[in-house]
Amino acid sequence: MIRFMLVLVTLIFASVLAPVASAPSAARRVVIRPVGNQMNFAVTTFRVRAGEQVRLVFENTATVEAMKHNVVILNDAAAIDRVGIAAISAADQGYIPDDEAILFHTALAGPQETVEVTFTAPSEPGAYPYICTFPGHYVLMRGVMTVTP
Ligand code: CU
């Protein structure tokens, strides 16, 4: 009788827990801030797993009006200069030029603003550069998202 009860309790627990266990896990949260009022990201590298959900939050902690920033993730380091330069004349698109190298990006955040973007990490492991495309910032504002298998 005790054994029967144990089996019954186990079955009940299994049925209750199963939906939780199979539910999709929450997105990985990555928070990036600038270094004070400098044109630098405080976080210049972070890791995600291929294909996982990523919630990238950019908190613009700057206090100077000129320090508007975004986070633009590219699929190719060789495209950094091209995208950075094209962004200068893309003010009407929030400094996000039309370029095939751009995978994901946040909106532009003014000082003391927070923006975020949720995306599915690339399925291909590797190094994916990110930059700020506010005019001129890409030269210094750079980081690398590493996608692991
Ligand atoms: Cu910037």
Image (spheres, rainbow, N blue to C red):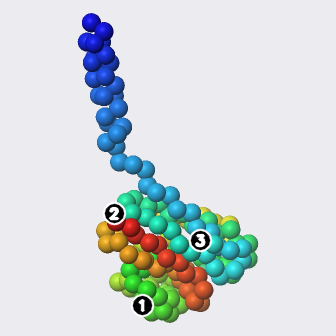
**Is 15 placed left or right of 40 in the picture?**
left
Residues under labels 3 and 1: Cα distance?
A: 21 Å
Residue 82, picture quadrant: bottom left
- SS for dot 1: helix
Residue 78: image tag:
1
Front residue of this view, candidates 133 and 10? 10
Q: Which residue is mark 2?
A: 51
Q: Which residue is rendered at x = 58% and y = 67% of the image?
A: 32
Q: In which quadrant is the N terminus drawn? A: top left
Reading the chain from its start, which is encountered first: label 1 or label 2? 2
Residues under labels 1 and 2: Cα distance?
A: 23 Å
**Is 59 rendered above or below residue 98?**
above
**Is 57 rendered above or below residue 109?**
above
Q: Residue furthest front?
A: 3
Reading the chain from its start, which is encountered first: label 2 or label 3? 3
Q: Residue furthest top?
A: 1
Residue type indicated by callout 3: Val
Q: Residues within 10 Å of mark 1 (few under 14, many from 20)?
A: few
CB of mark 3 within 8 Å of CB of mark 1?
no
Residue 58, picture quadrant: bottom right
Q: In which quadrant is the C terminus drawn? A: bottom left
**Is 13 rendered above or below residue 91?**
above
Q: Which residue is rendered at x = 57% and y = 63% of the image?
A: 31
Residue 102: image tag:
none
Q: Which residue is mark 3?
A: 43
